[in-house]
Amino acid sequence: MSDKTAIIIGASRGIGLGFAKHLVDRGYRVIATERSRSDDLHAAAEASDGAITIANCDVTDMASVKALGDHVEAGALDLLIMNAGIMGERPQPLDALTRENVADIVHTNATAPIQAALTLLPQLKEGGTIAMLTSKMGSIDDSSGGVNLYRVSKAAQNIFARSLFEEHAKDRGVGVLSLHPGWVQTDMGGPNALIDVDTSVSGMLDVIESESEPRHVFLAYDGSPVPW
Ligand SMILES: NC(=O)c1ccc[n+]([C@@H]2O[C@H](COP(=O)([O-])OP(=O)(O)OC[C@H]3O[C@@H](n4cnc5c(N)ncnc54)[C@H](OP(=O)(O)O)[C@@H]3O)[C@@H](O)[C@H]2O)c1
């Protein structure tokens, strides 16, 4: 095992679970979170020879986020992956916007992940990376339409991520990557999605590991830039 350490918030299934498995293969020690017991994550931990530690965390519960910091010494974390996210009820037409449904999805997908990243920033080492799982659907340039709440939440996350980098992370030498995982075969992406979890996750980890200078950019899993 290498001396690299990663925290993944939201690793019970889908892309987050894929990150946990691939990071172990790449030699990381991984703190991987679930909200309720995930048999798949526990099986991955059992197969990892101690490399995966499972913690309980809801990204909207800052006490559970703060407790994750106890697993890593301050300044010792290489990679923080903010993977947790929700699609919300579909469809999401403009004439069905309510104060409650906007607040719920924007809080879970944008505000809480940024607050969590800020809370755990002291654990990151100089040269470390915060990877924010966003979506091409949060790009104003993307005209796929529909799921307006989800799209707004990821656009908001992208803006918060820029502020996180400019106002907090840059001075500490920590990069912030807004990553589009592709359209991925998970519970959220559905069975007709274009790529599998392994393709998405190995691509994103190659992107993360190829960064040399701290910056904030919006990149897809294959390293191609995504328009804001
Ligand atoms: N799949 C795609 O095609 C696609 C495309 C673009 C972007 N993304 C983004 O990629 C990320 C992962 O997507 P996915 O496809 O793997 O989704 P998924 O299969 O629906 O899994 C979502 C993950 O997020 C966790 N989560 C949700 N709300 C949480 C909360 N409040 N606190 C902690 N964890 C929470 C879930 O935990 P539970 O099991 O406890 O619910 C689960 O581990 C998301 O941010 C998503 O928006 C996905």
Image: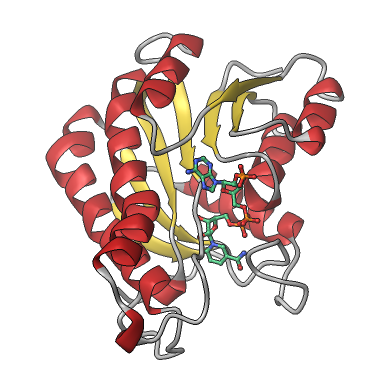
Along the line of sight, the residue nearer the viewer: 206 or 46: 46
Q: Residue furthest left?
A: 167
Res 214 visible = no
Q: Dividing the image into 4 quarters, which one contains the C terminus?
A: bottom left
Q: Which coloring applies here?
A: secondary structure
Residue 181, x across and y down, in percent: 56, 62
Res. 217 image quadrant: bottom left
> Where does the N terminus fall, quadrant-wise?
top right
Q: Residue at x 78, y 24 (%)?
A: 45
Looking at this view, is 14 or 5 the one in front? 14
- Tell how many labels: 0
Q: Quadrant of residue 31?
A: top right
* Front-lying residue, 28 or 11: 11
Picture residue at 39% right of the left edge, 50% below the top: 108
Pinpoint residue 150: horizontal percent, then vertical percent: 41, 69
Image point 22% across, 59% down: which residue?
159
Q: Say left or right for 106 vs 211.
A: left
Residue 141 vs residue 109, the one in the foreground: 109
Q: Residue at x 33, y 43 (%)?
A: 112
Determine if residue 97 is in view.
Answer: yes
In percent of width and height, residue 215 lies at 28, 49
Q: Relative to residue 128, is residue 79 drawn left or right?
A: right
